[in-house]
Amino acid sequence: MKVPVDLLIVNVGQLLTLAGPNEWPRTGSSLRELGLIRDGAIAAADGVIVAAGPAASVLDEVVLAPDGARLDAGGNVVLPGFVDPHTHLIHAGSRADEFVLRLGGATYQQIAERGGGIVSTMRATREASEDDLVALGRMRLDRMLAHGTTTVEAKSGYGLALDDELKMLRAIHRLTAAHEVDVIPTFLGAHALPPEHRGDPDAYVRRVVEEMIPAVVDEDLAEFCDVFCEAGAFTPDQSRTVLTAGAEAGLEPKIHADELSDLGGARLAAEVGAVSADHLLYASDEGLSAMAATGTMAVLLPGTALFLGLPYARARRMIELGVAIALATDFNPGTSPTYSMPMVIALGCIGMRLDPAEAIAAATINAAHAIRVAEEVGSLEVGKAADAVILDLTDYRELPMAFGTNPVRTVIKRGRVVG
Ligand code: NIG
Ligand code: FE
């Protein structure tokens, strides 16, 4: 008896299943294994994949229900929906003035020292209501979805006071309930020092640890706890204090590490057992080796290097050392205002010399591991969510060549066409 399904995608020229073993993030040569099937098909029922493989065998196994949807991929590439594992989705205001200042020669750090940067977005975000933030978030999720992102991580970190941090996280929760894209929340109270604590960062760190983390956990508002470990933000010692307190309260550590200088953030990530260290533009070999040894992933954000005019992270060295890499947009108003995972894949290849297959694995299955959703999404395998993207391309290697344009033709989330 054939299994009845409500979604059938046929005429798939290249089906990239990213099939396992997927228990662990991909490292080394396994990053290039896309599970490519020519002339493939996918079948799903109730949003879950029932079969994915060569068209002949899928069609042998399943039958489309009378009211089911049959999608013809037109001989194009089909791959898992992108997972964007590092964004600052929720914020208000604009940093266009700072962008122009930077074009005139000012650096990101100089602007931050003058009270701009993260603190400028903090001011606008504090003024916004929770409803305002939900409306902004919805508009941004629509755009991300149109670029093929079906799961996204979103951080707080522009409130920098208890009520405003909670407001941001509550907005994230409302969005994940109201939007097709799944949103995974991260608490980033230690993103910058708010002006009312100027001169006494330790007092702010105590607030984060003693007031904010317990309140966030009490309302079950976050999965992860992140820190911006950088000169001008938080020292490694302060970062350790926050991440350890977060971990004890049940929030897994993540860290903005070695983004603008080598402060030992990669080493600290390994020491606290972080699920990922993100950015790593200036990470040392020693820090990267420590990450490889503990299985801490590297979430690479090449949009930030492009937008700030900084050198790209040393992705090839990371792969050589056995670090598992993922790619993300870092979507935020100051250092990477892009919604587009295809653009990030292009930058990963052009800027960091990733092979297109490595970049795709980093933006799907490894990105899912970086936010602990790899059992659900990130590959097209039986039992996983039917989250898929049909490209306008017949060869996956053309994906990074399409920079600055949107190569996504159709987006499927939990078995439904949503974009
Ligand atoms: O990931 N580095 C810290 N956080 C963001 C920038 C946030 C901002 O400038 O508003 C980042 O680059
Ligand atoms: Fe970031």
Image: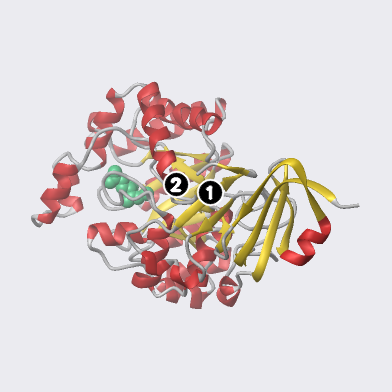
Residue 218 is left or right of residue 126, and the answer is right
Q: Position of residue 293 (x, y in %)?
A: 56, 68
Residue 13 is left or right of residue 163, and the answer is right
Identify the image quadrant of residue 138.
Answer: top left
Task: Name the amino acid type tagged 2.
Answer: Ala
Q: Position of residue 178 (x, y in %)?
A: 52, 29
Q: How is this picture coloured?
A: secondary structure
Identify the image quadrant of residue 286.
Answer: bottom left
Q: Which residue is mark 1?
A: 411
Residue 355 is left or right of residue 94, and the answer is right
Q: Secondary structure at mark 1?
A: strand
Q: Which residue is mark 2?
A: 146
Single out the residue that lies furthest toward the front.
66
Q: Mark 2 or mark 1: which comes first in sequence?
A: 2
Residue under the point 38% across and 52% down: 236
Residue 302's place in the image compared with 140, above or below, is: below
For the residues marked 2 and 1, what is the alpha-carbon distance in whole angstroms? 7 Å
Task: Name the amino acid type tagged 1.
Answer: Val
Residue contact between numbered discs 2 and 1, judged by CB atoms under 8 Å: yes
Label 2 packing within 10 angstroms: few (<14), some (14-19), many (20+): many
* Residue 30, numbered label: none
Residue under the point 34% across and 31% down: 159
Out of 330 and 162, give the one closest to the viewer: 330
Out of 59 and 315, give the one closest to the viewer: 59
Q: Position of residue 150 (x, y in %)?
A: 53, 46
Question: Could one spot residue 383 in this view of the protein?
Answer: yes
Question: Could one spot residue 229 in this view of the protein?
Answer: no
Label 1 packing within 10 angstroms: few (<14), some (14-19), many (20+): many
Residue 145 is left or right of residue 403, and the answer is right
